[in-house]
Each structure stands twice: as structure tokens, then as C-alpha cells.
Image (spheres, rainbow, N blue to C red):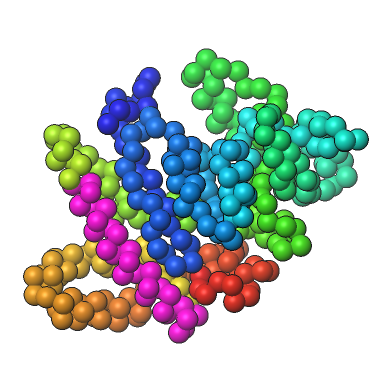
Amino acid sequence: MPGFGGVSSKSAACIQYEYDLKTGSIHDLNITPANRPDTRDAQDTQDNIMPKDLVIRDLGYYSTDVIKSFIEHEAFIISKLNTKTLVYEMVNNKYELLEFGKLYREMKKNKIPQIEKQVYIGAKTRLPIRLIIEIVPDEVFTQRMNKVNKYNKRMGFTTSSDYADRARFNLIITNIPCETMPGRTIIALYHVRWQIELVFKIWKSTFGVHKIGKMKYYRWLSILYAKLILIAIYWQTIMPARFYFYKAKGKLLSMDKCFKTLKSATGKLRDAMKNGVQAIQQLLTNIIELVSERHWLEKKKNRLNYEQIMYLEYCKSNIYAYI
């Protein structure tokens, strides 16, 4: 598969993965060339979105047109705002560009850490959307600027003043009404997106999906597909168990711990599959008993954990069967 080009690798691949956070069901698992933009995948899968769905995605999948499509399908979206997307306010029945530098100075002067605005995004689309604006600490701003300056220097670009002004903020867009969910909960809920990073971390550390030796293309592709099939089998084993134990004990299983245990039992799974359904059922019963003993998700000190985030405000209701 073609790579990113330039100074990057000549050949590379991306794994597109999308799943339902509540049920664990897999919506998309696909291998694409590395030079294919993630926004293309967002476009290709947008018809899978149903009314009342909540979509939380990485900034790389950002597309104003796709967000517009979600809203038209009566779904909800939480996303970071793309740094290049134009943002307008309605002033005296006219669209005026939002000046982030001016806004930052006003918020600092009045000691306002977070505000919300009804804005319109996109030079042509002018899509009405709710924008949550939160000032980041100075050290976060410095890290962002150092990172982008280093990249731009390598590529021969210059960092714009507009980018620097926006880098002062966390900018989150959503079409969830403010009376349904306050801004602080939106920001916390967006952090749940990092669960996908944990998933890929497990795939790398436990299954080595990123490790590639020198081999023919189709041999590599077969190995990768085999690993992904095994991951999918284990995923469909863990998620129902996670649901069951949360309902029964009010605690979440750790995906990392469960995947490591199941990976170590791959040989037993292979043998059970040779001996029929009864052997598989017995193996699964043994595994479920094992993970229920010492595979719980640990709480983070001085940080909201996964469970706490999901139970902020509106998530305390029975809308979420588990998580």
C-alpha cells in the first residue's frame, strides 16, 4: 500500500475502526492506504449514522459537510473545531468573523475561563453550531506552539497568527442543546474519545499489529487480517462480559487486562474450536470466571475516570444501559 510520501515511509497502511461505546458492537473495521485521508472514511461511513446517535471523532475525521450530514440525519456530534475552519458570528444580521485573539484578551481580562457562542462555521456552508470555548493553561499553549513550529520549520511553512490565537483555546463544537447538556459536560464527554487510543494501544502492545518484518505483501496482509479477526473475537467476548458485570457489580472490566488474558489463552481457544461448541462454551465460562476475579478497571488519582465521565449530569439517567 502507498505510504504518506515525502520523507515518510514508502509504504504504510491505516486501520479504520469505529464502534458503539455503549454496546461494544463494531461498526467499521477496515484497512486503507496511508495516503488516503481520514476525512474520506468519514464521508464513506456517514450513511451508517442513525437518528439520535452521538458521534465523537478525532479531529483528523473533521469535515464540515459530514457534520452537516449528521445534523440533517438528526444525529448529534461532538468534535474539536478544525484550525482552518472559518468561524462567524451574526452581528446586526450580518456574518462577521470571530476574532480569537480579541476574544482571548477579553476573557483573560475578565477572568472568564470558559464561554459558549452560537456560531456559523465554513466559508460556504455557514453551518449553525454551538461552540464551547475554553482557555488552556500557558504550558499547554507553549507545547502546541513548539510542536507546530517544529513541523512548519521542517516543511518550510510559517505559523500564522490566527493559529496562535486559536491555540490559546480548546474549541469544541456540538449540536447538543445547552439545556440538554452543559458545556463542562460536553468537554468531559469529548475525553471519552481517548478510549479509541486505548484500543489501538492494546492492539499494538498485546497483538503487535504494528510490527512488520520483511515479507511479501499478501503474506503480511494475511497475518494482519488474522490478527484483526482474533481481536474481533476477543472483543466480542469482552464487551458482553463487561456489560454483565457492570450491571451485576457496578464495576468496569479493564480491556487491557482482559485482552492480555485472552491472548495468553489463544492456544486453548484453538484446541476448543477443534473439539466443538461444548468445549468452546466451557472455555468461555472459565475465562469469564477468571476475569471477574482481578481484571477491574483501576481508578485514576485526581482524574475523572471513564465511568465518572459517562455519569456526568445527563449520563446519570437510564439512557446509558451501561458504561
The quadrant the N terminus occupies is top left
Q: Which residues are magenta?
A: 223-250
Query: Height in image: 279 above or below 104?
Result: below
Relative side of 217 to 177, left or right:
left
Q: Residue at x 50, y 73 (%)?
A: 322
Kindly indicate the quadrant of the structure image that contains residue 164. Answer: top right
Q: Residue at x 48, y 40 (%)?
A: 43
Query: What secondary structure is the stretch in magenta mostly built from?
Result: helix
Kindly indicate the quadrant of the structure image that contains residue 162. Answer: top right
Q: Residue at x 51, y 53 (%)?
A: 49
Q: Residue at x 68, y 52 (%)?
A: 175
For the question of whether residue 173 can be seen, the reply is yes
In reply to whether residue 234 is colored magenta, the answer given is yes
Q: Where is residue 50 drawn, in percent x and y? A: 52, 57
Q: How many marks?
A: 0
Q: Where is residue 127 drawn, in percent x and y? A: 69, 40
Residue lying farthest to the top in this orientation: 156
Relative side of 96 to 262, left or right:
right
In reply to whether residue 182 is colored magenta, the answer given is no
Q: Nearer the viewer, residue 242 or 18?
A: 18
Relative side of 290 to 169, left or right:
left
Q: Nearer the viewer, residue 78 or 288?
A: 78
